[in-house]
Amino acid sequence: MLYELANLDSLWGPLRLFRYLSFRCAGSAVFAFVLSMVIAPYAISLLHRIKFGQSFRTKDEVGKLAELHDSKKGTPTMGGVIIFAGVVSASLLFAKMNALVLTALFVYAGLSALGFADDYLKILRKNSKGVPGKIKLISQAAITAAALAILLSSQYRDAMLDLYAPFFKTPVWTSMPVWFAGIFLFFVLAGSSNAINLTDGVDGLAIGCTISAIMVFGIFAYACGNTIASQYLFLRFMPGSGELAVVCCATLGASLAFLWHNSYPADIFMGDTGSLALGGLVGIIAFMVHEPFTLVIVGGVFVMEATSVMIQVSTYKLTKKRFFKMAPIHHHFELKGWKETRVVARFWILSLIFALAGLATLKIR
């Protein structure tokens, strides 16, 4: 929207700055941060008043962990609405709208709605069970189908049907069948959204790791939309894909503002409203800039969390014994005696290392 102000630079010269992507990226990040910081206290106060507190599992269900997290009872959830307000507002203001931006915001909005319903049902029922798993998967599949339909009806159709992998200069598969692209995109979206959802278990962990990931894909998006950078780095050049960097910067700004209130001891939790949606947003952007496999590297902490759950479940089914003290793995370390702040700080360090490793794939092709 503000991009159009550049056409009025004859009236006031500085308006030409809105023509530059780097300026709009910075503006998007700052605007999202300020807006989220402003509305956060009001949102926290409102959620407190209407008693929208996080539901926790009982001591019979999780044992000692219930004691460790007892002080968190009553902390409001659904904080994802704070991030949502910052991301969407800043993106609509500073991004030049195209099919890529529209798809990213559609996926983000759709999964925010799903997460909101999940949180609301948990609060209503006063337990940790929200939207049934099958309904979640069906909803994610519907969002995937709609997102792919938007992309395939745009100028980016051919690009979206080429599959790239780290360390390769050219596509590993050109002109994928549409049905395979849909299945692949579903696994990317469902995997990333559910992985971040699993990571959201202690104060500041999920949002801190999301910040590292979204910065990396902001760089990828910026490079893909630049003819010189994309040619030099052997990336698929897509005109307009740089606008996704504006969305990434908006997410960065809103996430930093949320972390201000979510750091230990948290004033608010993001809930599924935030974690499912942010995971989907990271996943769809990774897919659109042709880095879905790099997401496994960049989101290494999220992969660890999801893998630990799969190992725990499969091991228990086979041997009736638990591989970890508790899954996801951050709870394992809590039960080993690590303080929550230590778990978060060390996982943030790992997240940064994984993010840098993902960026390194740009030069190893």
Image (cartoon, helix red, strand yellow):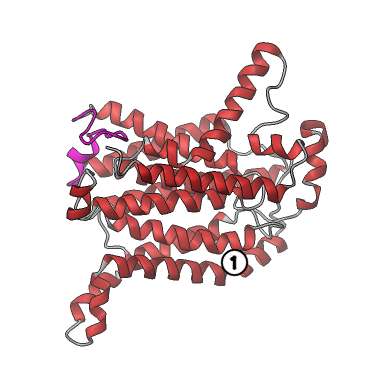
Does residue 236 show up magenta in the picture? no
Q: Which residues are magenta?
A: 154-175
Foreground of the two, 196 or 113 = 196
Foreground of the two, 265 or 48 = 265
| Circle 1 Cα neighbour tier, 10 Å, few/some/many (<14 / 14–19 / ≥20) | many
Which element type, helix, strand or loop, lies under badge 1? helix
Q: Quadrant of the C terminus?
A: top left
Q: How many marks?
A: 1
**In the displayed image of the protein, which residue is found farthest to the bottom?**
11
Residue name at image x 80 percent, y 47 percent: 70
Residue 30, compared with residue 84, is above or below; it is below
Q: Is residue 141 left or right of residue 236?
A: right
Residue 89, compared with residue 340, is above or below; it is below
Residue name at image x 44 percent, y 70 percent: 30
Q: Is residue 70 left or right of residue 165?
A: right
Foreground of the two, 355 or 288 = 355
Foreground of the two, 236 or 79 = 236
Give the image location of residue 158, x and y in percent.
17, 38
Give the image location of residue 24, x and y in percent.
32, 68
Residue name at image x 44 percent, y 43 percent: 280
Q: Quadrant of the N terminus?
A: bottom left
In this rendering, does residue 115 appear at all? no
Give the image location of residue 33, x and y in percent.
49, 67
Give the image location of residue 145, x and y in percent.
34, 36
Amino acid type shown at disc 1? Ala
Does residue 174 show up magenta in the picture? yes
Residue name at image x 55 percent, y 32 percent: 306
In this rendering, does residue 327 appear at all? yes
Q: Is residue 357 left or right of residue 302?
A: left
**In the displayed image of the protein, which residue is found farthest to the top?**
318
Magenta span: helix, strand or loop, mainly? loop
Give the residue pinned by disc 1.
40
